[in-house]
Amino acid sequence: MTDEDMIQREAADDKMISEAFDRLIGDYLKSRHRKKVDLITKAFNFARQAHKGVRRLSGEPYIMHPIAVAQIVCSEIGLGSTSICSALLHDVVEDTDYTVEDIENMFGAKIAQIVDGLTKISGGIFGEQASAQAENFKKLLLTMSEDIRVILIKIADRLHNMRTLDSQPANKQYKIAGETLYLYAPLAHRLGLYKIKSELENLSFKFEHPEEYASIVSQLERTKISRHQSFEQFTQPIEKALQDMGLEYEIRERVKTPYSIWNKMQNKHVTFDEIFDILAVRIIFTPKDRGDEVDDCFKIYTVLTKIYRRHPDRLRDWVTKPKANGYQALHVTLMSNQGHWIEVQIRSDRMDEIAEQGLAAHWKYKEVPQSAIDADNQEELMETIEEADQMNEWLHTIKEILDDPQPDAMDFLDAIKLNLFASEIFVFTPKGEIKTMPADSTVLDFAFSIHTFLGSHCIGAKVNHKLVPLSHRLCSGDQVEVLSSMSQHVQPSWINFVSTAKAKAKIQAILRRSQREVQKQGEELLEEWLGKNGFEPTQSVIDQLVRFHDAASRDELFQKLGEKTMLLGDSDVDELKGKNKKKGEAGGGGWRKYVPFVKAKKDSDEAHPKLFIVPEQFNRKKPVILTEENIGQFIFPDCCHPIPGDDVLGYIDNQNRIEIHKRACPIANRLKASYGNRILDVKWDMHKKLFFDATIRLGGIDRRGMVNDVTRVISNQLSLDIRRLTFTTEDGIFDGSIDLRVHDREDVKEIIDKLKEVDDLKEISQIM
């Protein structure tokens, strides 16, 4: 690049940066926040100088990323100067020589605290197999519990990273998209950021399943005109009724997101054309009096039910009892004149803004003195909005989990995630106090929510004055009196009786304390046995026994010895002296095992190929190519059974072997969120030479000849061998499954398409 080219490039960069910052300041000045333009400009200039000369993978100057995050924080979440400055500075400590102390000296303690919470850390609480992602998420949550703006800015940071993910290699895309879908999207939802949550889900879906995403977007475009016509026909009489009421209103057409559509297609085993709730209608009104907005919602509902027939089981009242994230609306499902159920969401303009922007929007509608709005700490109002009894309780639960985190990264993230996804039920104490609990909570969850001591000694409860066991699931409206006994103690089976993150964390913490005592006894027994047999209690000797007994860890070995469920004997002595034959390479237990596949030619006498071990200098950015020749060198866990044509990824396990998972596999989702640096891009290069197991599930109306019709399609038309066929019928409805051997995903699609031609066959899907 010539000097002239460099000058032109720098001029273009300066113009782009200045325009982006001017847009940020312009949007900030339109807000109700106290105008601290000088502070924001100071933060921008500081960050620009700190990141000078650095470019992102996309090629643009690095400072464009902090500006973009600050823009999201300002315009899409609605935060003020403290958050905007923190967003502009969020990568300075991590990526430059500046420290948190430098930030504090220049911008004050509050901004420094937020930047510190946003800065990644090294080292960890999880030991040798530490998950940096879990560590960083833990620190984020710790700081969030002190200042909620930390997580709001982090979500903005993640949103911009997702919007610019194209420049990353595929393995990084899977890691970041998986982590986003697993943690950040539900976190955004829990904080009421519905619009951002939907975009995070869609972008994750786009990068993990690009073909399915493109297909659904194309089909949405194809049906756009007919969908809009349905909207116009459906809303025409509604518009007239709302005008007669004298309301100021807006009616919007809400279309289901591609990710939501795909999710429903997967869960319900239906095609795009079989989803009838793609269209929904949103009525947003401005009340004449803020105090009447709840009544206005129900008045609109009454008018709608006079125009259209309502679904008796689909009224959702989040107006009188909002969700924990602040969401308020009245949802009703109505039958259109075209014979389709259409959901209508009724909300005021205030409810709509809170639904889109979440917590940050609450303060705008709060009755506060003008002096408070003009005060220097005006932005701090957002932290006290609603005094967020439910949100504070949620943050308190997060703190409790962080106080005693799971030693395993995936368990820790699961515990957090449990609390993010929970929808609510409302139960009463014996004194009539309302307590909000996650859906599916049990008596034991309720006991632990009141106090750890009460949960630890719970023997059951009286629910609505009837005696029930501690595993009894609660429903909204239940009155619960917990019964306890000092002779009762926490049992390992209790983990199956709870669904809340708090109860799981407390039970596991108590069990771990008792396990540590047992493990200590086991360790002492092992050292005594080793001494008697002339062995030193070194780590290598203990690890040899761990492998010999297929234990997952040293702690598990100590646990078995302490519980007396394992005894050491002569075979262990022989093993340590090297007299036993080496155990198989693929040993290990747990959920890892091979999915059997059959070669087209009969060469089953060949020795199973050795597993591929990832070398130290392995290039993790290049895709792993699966072929007929090397497929036996990889582990195919039995959690998802991937076959050629599936969207897959690789995971480097603790022994440097590579597992192959479907990208949508629940286990893979946890791995992406916990150990993203071990994720690999994987591509298929197969040529229909091998067969893989596949199971097709069938359902429909039972009739004479149904089984014959199904088998004729598979055996005669497709020339495939059926390995197993099961059919059960009840009250004229049948349910069945067919085990087949197929070459790839194309074979499965062809089978399903052909079976759809069979009369009375209503449900056809592949079982994972």
Image (cartoon, rainbow, N blue to C red):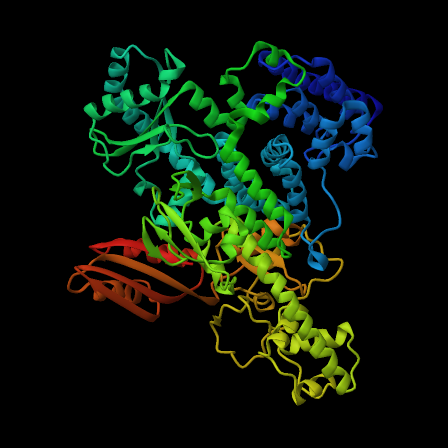
Camera sees residue 187: yes
List x then y, in percent, for residue 378.
63, 17
Question: Which residue sits at x=47%, y=72%?
Answer: 598
Quick one: 592 or 686, which is closer to the camera?
A: 592
Query: Does residue 231 appear to the left or right of 69 in the view shown?
Result: left
- Pinpoint residue 677: horizontal percent, then vertical percent: 67, 51
| Quarter of the image that includes the N terminus | top right
Q: Nearer the viewer, residue 233 or 424?
A: 424
682 is higher (above) or lower (below) than 549: above
Q: Is residue 598 above or below residue 144?
A: below
Q: Is residue 89 left or right of residue 728?
A: right
Relative placement, left or right, of 264 versus 162 is: left
Q: Quadrant of the C terminus?
A: bottom left
The residue shown at (21%, 66%) is: 708
Residue 641 visible in this rendered orientation of the protein: no
Considering depth in this image, is 465 or 303 the residue closer to the camera? Answer: 465
Q: Position of residue 241 (x, y in %)?
A: 24, 16
Residue 658: quadrant of the picture: bottom right
Task: State left or right for residue 490 relative to residue 480.
Answer: right
- Residue located at (75% from left, 47% from top): 122
Q: Nearer the viewer, residue 177 or 484?
A: 484
- 692 versus 60 height, above or below: below
Q: Quadrant of residue 87?
A: top right
Q: Position of residue 759 (x, y in %)?
A: 20, 55
